[in-house]
Image (cartoon, grey):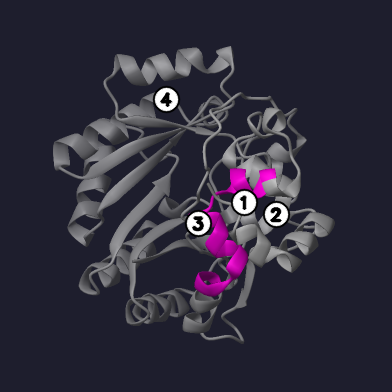
Amino acid sequence: MRKLAFGYSTRCTIRCAHCVASGDHPNSIKMDHETAKGLILELARAGVGGVSFSAGEPMLYRNEIGELVKLCRHSSIYTRIVTNSFWARTDEVADQLVAELKENGLCQLRLSFSRWHQQHVSRDNILRAAQSCRKIGLEYFVSFITDFSEEDDPYEQYLRDHGLTFFPEPVIYAGRAESFDRRKIFTDYQANCCEMNPYLTPDLHMYGCCDAGSHFSETNFFYLGSLNDTPLEQLFRKSETDPMFTLIRTMGITNIASYAGMSGREIITYSKCELCRQLFNSPETLSRLRAEVHKLSAWRR
């Protein structure tokens, strides 16, 4: 099933230091609403079965997003909204907006939470949003962004103390987070396969992976093209047939890194997204891997 991260607008209510979707000088870009409605119908014709509304803060345009969610429901497309929960200021407001989203046909809310988010939005907003989802019967989960430092322990404990469904996710050192000092982590020597759902920007550029993929400034590795001059189906097929993308999905980034000459000891210090950037934002490494893609595909157990 095809899935797409749908960037409706880059505008946000807050300015988080770790945000991968924005750099130091973000431009506020918004998709034309009529264009967006037409795109939803086009996505349905292209066999897209899941859309995640993301980029900036979708709930800034809740009426417009609500219309798009309705269109998705009528087109049998699963929908998710990624939000910082700024709107959940009281129990009553949270209940009202969650009920409205469910009535429109939304399938799931993804609630962003981190020590950086919570410098701007009270953690109680997250709790209210999650409790409203439970009360109204809307699926949710908390996306807990972390660099796995001790500083994050109280934030994780807050989620546990309130019995919220959450999943830790590593900081991606791109966008504003590019200025962070990277913390070495030590993982299992795992395949690090990636589903690679394409990402559509508000100005209709499409990338082969999430919004971090738009920050590969040295190679533009994930850039698929623009809907302004290329049909949607053609961009999806480009994503699905690129030999290197296929190996990322099936072989995994770890094996590709090993083939490229990176030691196992170094590989396990990177998260999946960081390892991907080490490989594919290097013009020299990428050129070699593309030239040797048939040999690379045989690098298997």
**Mark 4 or mark 2, which is nearer to you?**
2
Outermost residue, right direction? Answer: 284
**Mark 4 or mark 1, which is nearer to you?**
1
Residue placed under numbered mark 3 in the picture: 249
Residue placed under numbered mark 4 in the picture: 123
Horizontal side of residue 274 vs 37, given as left or right? right
Range of the magenta residues?
239-258
Q: As displayed, is residue 222 above or below residue 235?
A: above
The reply to whether the C-beta atoms of the residues labelled 2 and 1 are less than 8 Å apart is: yes
Residue depicted at 30% across the width and 30% down the height: 165
Sequence-earlier tag: 3 or 1: 1
Which secondary structure, mark 4?
helix
* Label 4 – label 1 distance at C-alpha: 25 Å
Q: Quadrant of residue 214?
A: bottom right
Sequence-earlier tag: 4 or 1: 4
Residue depicted at 56% across the width and 27% down the height: 187
Which secondary structure, mark 1?
helix
Between 110 and 28, the residue placed more toward the observer is 110
Q: Is residue 123 magenta?
A: no
Q: As displayed, is residue 229 above or below residue 187?
A: below
Q: Say what amino acid the circle numbered 1 marks.
A: Ala
Which secondary structure, mark 2?
helix
Residue 212, labelled with which disc?
1
Residue 215, labelled with which disc?
2
Q: Say what amino acid the circle numbered 3 marks.
A: Arg
Can residue 26 be seen here? The reply is: no
Residue 189 coordinates in the image, percent (x, y): 56, 32
